[in-house]
Amino acid sequence: MDNSFLLDAMDWSYSRVSSFDQCPRMFYLTYLLCKDRQDNAFAQWGTLAHSLLEQYYRGQVELWDLSVLYEEEYADAVTEQFPFPKLEDSYYSRGREYFDNFSGQLADETDVLAVEDRYTSTLHGIPVVGVIDLVLRNPSGLIVCDHKSRGKWKSKEERRKYLRQLDLYALRVKEQYGEWPSELWFNKFREGILDREPFHLSTVKEDADWFLRSIDNIYAAKKFPAKPDRFFCDYLCSVRKYCKHSGNQ
Ligand code: SF4
């Protein structure tokens, strides 16, 4: 089947491209067949924390209200089941702990330039979209910051993969502010740590190439095979109810 007319209409983002990497079938069901998507407890928990941080950085809520808001909003925000109750307890407590201890300052930032910067742009003529959680400034320059709900990186390679997203955001920062960021930050709120990476122009080029090459691969794909991963298929895949590889169809 020729999917090019559907792909031509698409705005491309890091998450769309990486969903093809994660599982071509998930990409197919989500973006070409447009199946309705199912949430999961991990993502809902992450969305709640993102939303509270966004409201704080927009000046819509006070620092001292964050913990109470987290408690009040948790039940309505996290409606899906965690795989087992102990995991839910752990996530709930981590969130509470994070907001109890959040000082309002991630590190040495001095200015907040943008919060949830939802942008559209182009890369080599391809329409690109993204949302940057925070653009900050510190004495060394601009910072791209992404709030991440995941725990410890499984490997250096995994961290490097996630840095691709921040390098793509760096392109937007350069376009918007006329300067490259000096640092890329992951605010890993589940772990309560800030993971900082100095910015490198060479990796931006590498990651833009990866992004464009991946889109070419999607256009060239004749088949979209399943790439099952037990935990991901059972609990995280947003189109799991349409796939025989999920134990939670
Ligand atoms: S359930 Fe697993 S194999 Fe099926 S589409 Fe989702 S990620 Fe792919």
Image (spheres, rainbow, N blue to C red):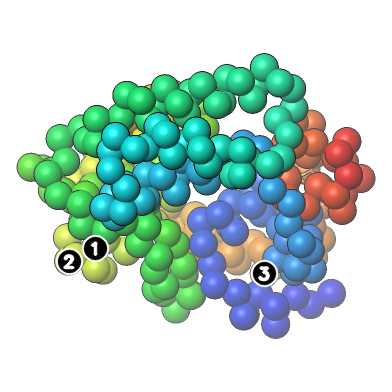
Q: Nearer the viewer, residue 168 or 246?
A: 246
| Residue at mark 1 | 174
User: Quick check: is the Cβ at mark 3 less than 8 Å away from ligand 1?
Assistant: no
* Residue 229 left/right relative to 217: right
Q: Label 1 near label 2: C-beta < 8 Å? A: yes
- Where does the image place residue 249, in percent across and percent down from the top left? 88, 44
Q: Label 3 near label 2: C-beta < 8 Å? A: no
Mark 1: few/some/many CA within 10 Å (<14, 14-19, 20+): few
* Residue 51 left/right relative to 21: left
Q: Nearer the viewer, residue 59 or 145?
A: 59
Q: Looking at the picture, which amino acid does disc 3 mark?
A: Tyr
Q: Which mark is residue 219?
A: 3
N-term mark: 2 or 3? 2
- Where does the image place residue 209, in percent across and percent down from the top left? 45, 58
| Residue at mark 2 | 178
> Which residue is painted at 36% across and 25% down in the image?
100
> Which residue is painted at 48% across and 75% down in the image?
127
Query: How far, Cα to Cα, is label 1 from label 3?
Result: 28 Å
* Residue 132 left/right relative to 226: left
N-term mark: 1 or 3? 1
Instruction: Give residue 77's quadrant in the image.
Output: top right
